[in-house]
Amino acid sequence: MNAEAVDIDVRSAEGCTVLQACIECQSEDRKTRPKMLIDAGADLNSLGLMFQTALHRGALREDEVAMKMLLAAGVDRSVRSTIDGCDTAEEDARDQKEYAAADFIASYPQNSSPDEVGRERASSQ
């Protein structure tokens, strides 16, 4: 992907960012496309669809793959939506009873790569 030739932070008419659209996608590509956008420099903390970040959308979908990619890339988990309760992704997931997603965000070590987290989890089992 050539980040200079394509605006990777473009939005749909509804405000959805390309990164959010990839997370919302139902195809198997949703496991690889977000990483391509992250590597190309997509804004991880941008508020888009429903005035939420990509991490909010991943959490509400309980998409551990997307959450792991975003957290490993350094998404700011303290960013709050600007609608309803103005919650962080973790708080929003708890409010929506998506406890596994909220717990995943809360337990994900700061500044860790997905490989480091996998090794930590495997050693704790």
Image: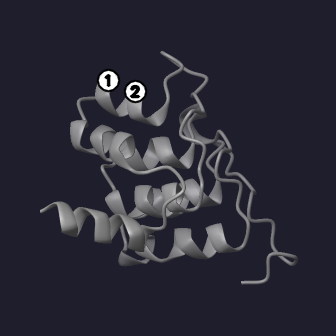
Give the x, y percent position of residue 119: 30, 71
Give the x, y percent position of residue 71: 50, 55
**Dot 2 crowding, Cα within 10 Å, few <14, some 14–19, many 20+:** many
Q: Quadrant of residue 46?
A: top right
Q: Residue furthest bottom?
A: 1
Q: What colour scheme was applied to this rendering of the protein?
A: one colour
**Residue 53 drawn above or below residue 31:** above
**Residue 95 drawn above or below residue 68:** above
The residue that label 2 is drawn on is 91
In the displayed structure image, the side of residue 39 where residue 83 appears, left or right: left
Residue at (58, 61) in percent of width and height: 73
The residue that label 1 is drawn on is 95
Whether pointer 2 and pointer 1 mark residues with C-beta atoms closer than 8 Å, the reply is yes
Amino acid type assigned to the residue bearing label 1 in the image: Asp
Q: Considering the numbered disc 1 on the image, is that residue within a helix, a strand or a loop?
A: helix
Amino acid type assigned to the residue bearing label 2 in the image: Glu
Q: Residue furthest left?
A: 125
**Dot 1 crowding, Cα within 10 Å, few <14, some 14–19, many 20+:** some
